[in-house]
Image (cartoon, grey):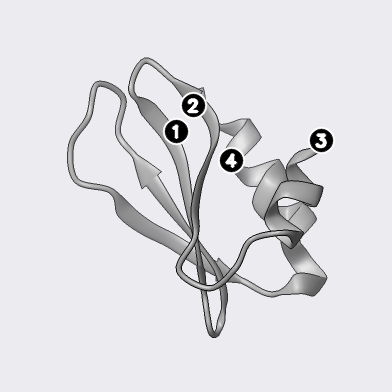
Amino acid sequence: MSDLENLLKMEYEDTIYLNWFEEGGGEVIRVYEGWQLYEVPQYGGMPRLYGTYSKDNLQELIDEVNSWT
């Protein structure tokens, strides 16, 4: 299943992880306003909010998280 399909199937308050590596990457939480993307630092640490995305720009969310190394 693609990242986009996984995002679209999320229910409110669900959490998924994208481009996860070495205990870091993108954490996405489905909220009423859309999908919140958090950047989790490599090897752990406090996630920080990167942005909130709507259904219309979910591909931007996927492209952004996949650009992180």
Gap between marks 2 and 3 measured at Cα: 16 Å
Image quarter in which the N terminus is found: top right
Gap between marks 4 and 3 measured at Cα: 17 Å
Helix, strand or loop under label 1: strand
Quarter assignment of residue 63? top right
Looking at this view, name the residue that lies furthest to the top. 22
Name the residue nearer the viewer: 65 or 20: 20
Q: Is residue 21 above or below residue 17?
A: above
Which mark sits nearer the N-terminus, 4 or 2?
2
Asked whether the residues under the numbered discs 2 and 3 touch, taking CB atoms below 8 Å apart as contact, a structural biologist would say no
Asked whether the residues under the numbered discs 4 and 1 touch, taking CB atoms below 8 Å apart as contact, a structural biologist would say yes
Question: Residue at the spot x=64%, y=61% of the render?
Answer: 10
Q: Which amino acid, mark 1? A: Gly
Judging by the rendered image, the residue that carries numbered circle 4 is 65
Q: Is residue 63 above or below residue 55?
A: above
Gap between marks 4 and 2 measured at Cα: 9 Å
Asked whether the residues under the numbered discs 3 and 1 touch, taking CB atoms below 8 Å apart as contact, a structural biologist would say no
Q: Which label was assigned to residue 25?
A: 1
Judging by the rendered image, the residue that carries numbered circle 3 is 1
- How far across and down, in percent of the image, does residue 65 sit? 58, 40
Which mark sits nearer the N-terminus, 4 or 1?
1
Asked whether the residues under the numbered discs 1 and 2 touch, taking CB atoms below 8 Å apart as contact, a structural biologist would say yes
Question: Residue at the spot x=78%, y=49% of the render?
Answer: 4
Q: Name the mark nearer the viewer: 2 or 3.
A: 3
